[in-house]
Amino acid sequence: MKASDCWRERSRTAKVAGVVAAAAWLGCTGSQSALDPQGVQADRIYSLWNVMFVSSIAIFVIVMAFVIVAVVRRSGELDGRRSWRWVVGGTVATVVLLIGLIVYDAGVTRAIEREPADAMEIRVLARQFWWDFRYTGEPASRSLRTSNEVYIPVGRAVRFVLESPDVIHSFWVPNLHGKTDAIPGRVTTTWLRADRPGIYRGQCGEFCGLQHSKMAFELIALPPDEFERWFERELLPAAEPPDELAARGQEVFLQHCAFCHTVRGTSAMAVAGPDLTHLARRRMLGAAWIPNQRGHLGGWILDAQRIKPGSHMPPIEVAPDDVHALLHYLENLR
Ligand SMILES: [Cu+2]
């Protein structure tokens, strides 16, 4: 091979390695990555993962080194007594290392389970295939329900109380904590704390049916004062229809959608589907699957089965003018 060809080949290899490294790095960061911890619980898990990972690599390298030495050296070079020393030494080192890792693992587990006394509580109903969040306030008028979007204050522990009315789901926000199952007939809890503001993607971590992979949500961590402002604004009932078209849209909504959905401040109080009181402020629709834009919203209303086959949202038959009015009404639910 000529020198120039060799250089070109090396350059191509370096480029491929660069792309692979960049892809690997990108895969390890972002809004849904356990390798990019943004809270105290995820930090602990990440540290444990690092220790286990580095230990495993070190053990693998050492064992392989011994295997190579054993293969390369001629048999009988070590006398029996020295061989036994190596075997006993290796066994003792393995036992000591394993005990060390078990003790460390137990310490991390205890720290993860130790919940701060001042944790705020959010109840979670995991359902096929979406998430229902409830803030239980005192008095009851300060209780709140949101769907597929949960807001928490930065720097404060939050206890999530999990239930499921149908099958086993798993509550998982990789940047903030590991998974906790929501099991029918049982109540499970987990707690986490976001240490930096941001939008973190949560995902059902347990196969729960046809649309399991599209059962996501967004956890939005806000500075405490911004969280309080969000909470107070979210407590408000839905805005009145601002014009005639929106008023017609509200009629269409009450006629077709009120059997499943709530819009506080109207007669729509059903809880089979998400609370839509402030729908227009949401970033995403369909359990964090499609952006909250007019076209997507219209498609979702008319034929959700095309977007998420197997979801419990039925197709709705509405005259084209009424669809226009309904969309206008929903876009004003700010
Ligand atoms: Cu699932």
Image: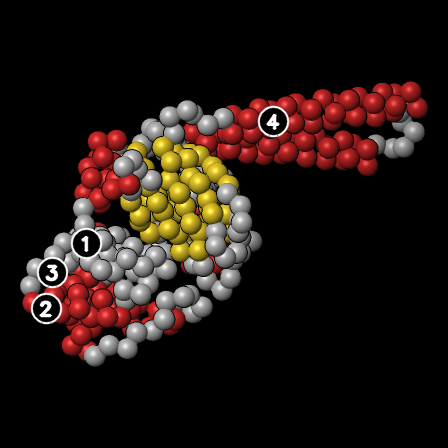
Which residue is under mark 2? Answer: 245
Crowdedness of circle 3 by 10 Å Cα count: few (<14), some, many (20+)?
some
Q: Which mark is residue 265?
A: 1
Are the residues flagged by discs 1 and 4 in contact, CB closer than 8 Å? no
Q: Secondary structure at mark 4?
A: helix
Image coordinates for residue 152, horizontal then vertical, percent: 32, 37
Q: Amino acid at mark 4?
A: Ala
> Distance from label 2 to label 4 (Cα)?
61 Å
- The quadrant in which residue 248 appears is bottom left
- Between the residue at mark 3 and the residue at mark 4, the CA separation in whole angstroms equals 56 Å
> Around disc 2, counting alpha carbons within 10 Å, would you say few (fewer than 14), some (14 to 19), or many (20 or more)?
some
Q: What is the total number of numbered labels drawn onto the structure image?
A: 4
Front label number (3 vs 4)? 3
Inspect the image, locate mark 3, and give the three-letter code of the amino acid beneath it: Pro
Q: Residue furthest left?
A: 243
Q: CA distance from mark 2 to mark 3?
A: 8 Å
Q: Earlier in the sequence, mark 1 or mark 2?
A: 2
Q: Which residue is mark 3?
A: 241
